[in-house]
Image (tube, rainbow, N blue to C red):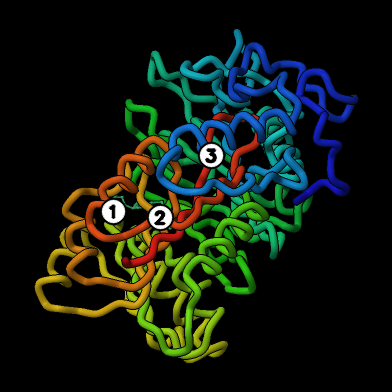
Amino acid sequence: MSSGKALDPSNTIRSGNDRSRCAVSKNCGGCIYASVPYAEQLKKKEKSVKDLLSGICEVRPIVGAKEPLYYRNKVHWAFGHLGTHLIAGRYAEGSHRIIENDHCLLEDKECAKILSDIRELAIKFKIRSYDERTRQGLLRRVLLRKGSTTGEIMVVLVLSSPVLPGKKGFIKSLLEKHPSIKTVLININTRTDSMILGEKTICEFGRGFIYDELLGVRFKISPESFYQINHDQTEKLYSLAIDAASLKKGEKILDAYCGIGTIGLCAASSTEGILLTGVELNRAAVSDARENAKLNAERTSAFTKARFIAADATKFMTEAAAKNEKYDVVFLDPPRAGTTQEFITACEKLSPERIVYVSCDPVTLARDLKIFKKHGYEPQYAVPVDMFPFTEHVETVVQLMLQ
Ligand code: SAH
């Protein structure tokens, strides 16, 4: 985290002390809990999980953030213009209206400073911002990612065409100001939808990716990789998931919906001789996961016994059940839609002793836990984790045991 000591949890974005005051929260709309003291936000989130899981299992106290501000390690600003003046900032919630705000209380401070310097440089180098209506102009967005442990920063300039006038001087000036920038890429986005990145990315400086660490395990992060945006809370979430798995030496584990392999590889590093299989739909993430296993291979034998498969998690599970494969523990971390009835049926056939469900939506979690119960898995306890302070989102870890 970029800022020092922990905030008093009674602070709010709009009505706390000077450090926790946001001038634009009303126009921006990104923080639904802008005027709610942090302690109260936690209570609200805990209650919503308790209500949804009532009658299903015990819900333990929510794990809040020590520092609820400046947690976003992935920050992107849109570029546009007001008359002839170049502007840059977040889009207001649900619109493409740019809100200029160099002091967003959720964005990593160093990233926000780099972005405001990029805006100054764009003005100095006379780079035209892109106009979504006329489809004229060049600079659409800038995406920054920061490795919270390593301090490495990636800058992705999203352009409507590959030709950036004064490119060398622009990048040189930026690097001189901010030596923590380890790589600069240009992404060409000619799309008309609201996707941030287009298909083609060219590396202009550095290795094209950054490293970060979670629980002592190193991860390669590419511009497109899914990577949790709140580093400190992610470590707490994963530690809870690993605790819930009660791993023993040499066990066989499955990480379903594994992204770049973060949960599985952290779990594998926690216990000797773990045999890890990860399954994930996104091919780029699977290739990152394989590299991440190699990258950490010297640390423990577990990583050399990791395999990652690009497939639909349900299809993989159904085939594994048909082949009578055995797993001691299954982790699943599906998107907000939750998992499928078929995934759960296949779990029953594979009969791992323990299942750890990491959920980003308590509504679909409650639905899936009820189905797990019918298939012989009893939820033991749930722990909500506040990954996104000031927003309404809440993650939850649940331990399930085969009855
Ligand atoms: N466990 C990872 C990623 C969680 S996000 C982490 O903590 O970083 C959910 C992941 O599920 C995404 O990477 C997404 O690409 C993947 N996914 C979505 N649908 C899927 C499916 N049907 N089968 C497998 N993976 C899927």
Q: Element at badge 1?
A: helix
Residue 93 in the image: state x and y as whole percent.
Answer: 52, 19
Q: Is residue 395 left or right of residue 35?
A: left
User: Please, what is the three-letter code of the amino acid marked with disc 3?
Assistant: Val
Q: Is residue 198 left or right of residue 103?
A: left
Which of the numbered marks, if any, corresponds to residue 379? 2
Residue placed under numbered mark 3 in the picture: 394
Q: CA distance from mark 1 to mark 2?
A: 8 Å
Q: Residue at x 84, y 39 (%)?
A: 7
Q: Is residue 306 left or right of residue 169?
A: left
Q: Element at badge 3?
A: loop
Residue 9 in the image: state x and y as whole percent.
Answer: 80, 35
Relative height, residue 203 to residue 155 (above, below): below
> Is residue 363 visible from the viewing direction of this image?
yes
User: Please, what is the three-letter code of the amino acid marked with disc 1?
Assistant: Phe
Relative height, residue 40 to residue 337 (above, below): above
- Sequence order check, earlier mark of 3 and 1: 1
Q: CA distance from mark 3 to mark 2?
A: 18 Å
Relative height, residue 219 to residue 73 (above, below): below
The quadrant in which the C terminus is found is: bottom left
